[in-house]
Image (spheres, rainbow, N blue to C red):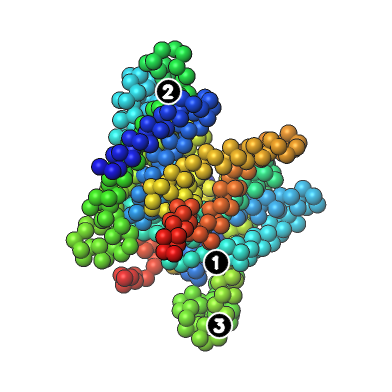
Amino acid sequence: MKRYLWTIGFGVALFGLTCLLPSFQNYQLATVAAYLCATAGLTVLTGQCGQLSLGHGALMATGAYTVALMQSAFENLPLSLVAGVLVTVLAGAVIGVAAARLRGPYLAGVTLAVAVVVPGIATMFHDVLGGDQGLTFYLAPPPFGYDFPFERWQAWIALTAALLTMLLLGNLAASRYGRAFRAVRDDEIAAQLSGIHVARTQVLAFVVSAAGAGLGGGVLAVLALSVSPGAFSLTLSLFLVMAIVVGGLGSLAGAVWGAFLLVALPDLTARVTEVVPLSPALAQRLEGNLPLAVFGITLVVVMLAAPGGIQGLISSALTAKRGR
Amino acid sequence: MDRIVFLTVDGLSRGAVYAAMALALVLIWRGARIVNFAQGAMAVAAAYAGHSVTAATGSFWLGFLAALAAGLALGWLVERLVMRHVGHDRPLNAVIVALGLVLLITAVLGIVYGNEFRPAPPAFDRTAGFAGLSPYDIFVFLSVAVTVGALAVLFTRTKAGLRLRASAFAPEVSRLLGVNVGGMLLLGWVLAAGVGALAGMLIIPTEFGLHPNAMDRSFVVAFTAAVVGGLDSPLGAVIGGLAVGLVLSFVGGYLGDQVTPLAIIVLLLAVLLIRPDGLFAARAARRI
């Protein structure tokens, strides 16, 4: 019950916030919400169930392309998003069944292969998926009249998706399935002895996290009103892993931090490079690459110095304070 | 007939490079139980270093040597500065750190050299001659054969090789017997990174050219090759590399180039699901 109240409270606060923010910040907020769907799903899989997936960028692409195709065909947003989630769940189930038999670096390698290979599928089925150019589609204007800002409408869509994801995943983590996830992560054999079907649990975790990735990808497509393979490269998959690790593996609050960082860090580096005078050529190279470098360094440093991530630091600070 | 000969030679030539990369993965896996996901990015960085030296001096071979040296140095740096300090409480830690390195290395290369493709001309002519072999193929086969031979001699015939194998097989006992296990780990990383750099220098000229992400797909293929052979088996890595090279060459030749990426996944999944320890690894009792 408490969780529902929190969700409603957060929802009201965030929807209120969108009415105060200018449209670009609303767009950023919506992007955070879209990433949050994916990072929350991934943290259930990696943090709670102990399976690393480097292929979630590809799953987001699945959701995004499904939404784009469905929007072009039916122009019904809820229907498109649901279809995006369902198709991604199907893809996730296929990978998940294979993944449940794989461990550690083997699983990482297979999902890495998925992440590297899947963007090429858009070129393979050039006629349907539009090749390197991708697809664009149309989103109906908000049903509140034409002076309602379009970015605020997008933010509302994204926030609804994110809040729903967080609520459902929070419930799942607190349920017996969540306990099964953590038991499998900590010791597969002990979990098996306590009557948990390990493979089934792992497939379930993969399917749930694929649903999150599909929804996140679909919302991302709705924000850009287009999809292209370049947006779902291996780098995106690595970004998602970075986000959940730096945010704090396994906690949904960590996923929020991670999603926030995914939007805030590039913005921050862009501002820094604007302040420092640079030659245009160098500035152009820095624009795409500096955030990558910052992400990479952050990931390595966090893994070496504070494996608990931001949320880990916060909760240990809180317990230290209480203990005194 | 000509087509079969061409595809076989091309497949074996690419396969030899995949074999070298897979061997580098196996070297580190045996020593440290880490799959070095940053290997492709490290090899690209070494190739860029070679490119710079070639551009500055005008000599291809000076650049080639510089790339190999850069590879060795990068292996040393990565082990000393990063990998040595990774916690071992979860097997995922090392993978995640390696992925962080991938992001960092590609980003730095993009900042220094830009994200456009740079031409990387092959050292020798690539037109097929006698028996479908081009001079470049012969160069590839010779380089890989010399490298694999040198590693085999190092591991089976020298004292350093014995120490390397001992510290990989039983680190605690080796340490008690006076083997510098940390040093052996470092040596393993340096050797592997050097082999990886060589593989990068050999394969990049046969593809689109130098790019910060140039080795992404090759790395996945090399990982597949290492898995096919069994991550624990150097011989398996070499055979796995050649086999995967052949399979991909024939799939690309007869079904079209767009299908090869899917073939990689199917091959990788098939091997992992049917024989997860690889085709050449000794079956171990189940670890608990």
Q: Residue at x 21, y 58 (%)?
A: A196
Marks 1 and 3, Cα distance to the nearest angstrom? Answer: 20 Å
Q: Amino acid at mark 3?
A: Val
In terms of secondary structure, where does tag 2 sit?
helix
Q: Is residue B44 above or below residue A30?
A: below
Q: Is residue A318 above or below residue A138?
A: below
Q: Residue most toward the top?
A: A146
Quickly name the residue at label 1: B85
Residue A22 is at least partly visible in this image: yes
Q: Residue at x 66, y 40 (%)?
A: A272
Marks 1 and 2, Cα distance to the nearest angstrom? Answer: 47 Å
Residue B224 is at least partly visible in this image: no
Left or right, B32 with respect to A64, comes to: right
Question: What chain letter is assigned to the residue under label 2?
Answer: A
Q: Residue most toward the left?
A: A195
Q: Position of residue B119 (x, y in %)?
A: 68, 41
Marks 3 and 2, Cα distance to the nearest angstrom? Answer: 66 Å
Quickly name the residue at label 3: B179
Determine the image quadrant of residue B208: top right
Q: Residue at x 50, y 45 (%)?
A: A239
Same-subunit check for callouts 3 and 2: no
Same-subunit check for callouts 1 and 2: no
Q: Position of residue B170 (x, y in %)?
A: 46, 79
Few, some or many C-alpha atoms within 10 Å of disc 1 (few <14, some 14-19, many ≥20)? few
Quickly name the residue at label 2: A153
Q: Position of residue A110 (x, y in %)?
A: 40, 51
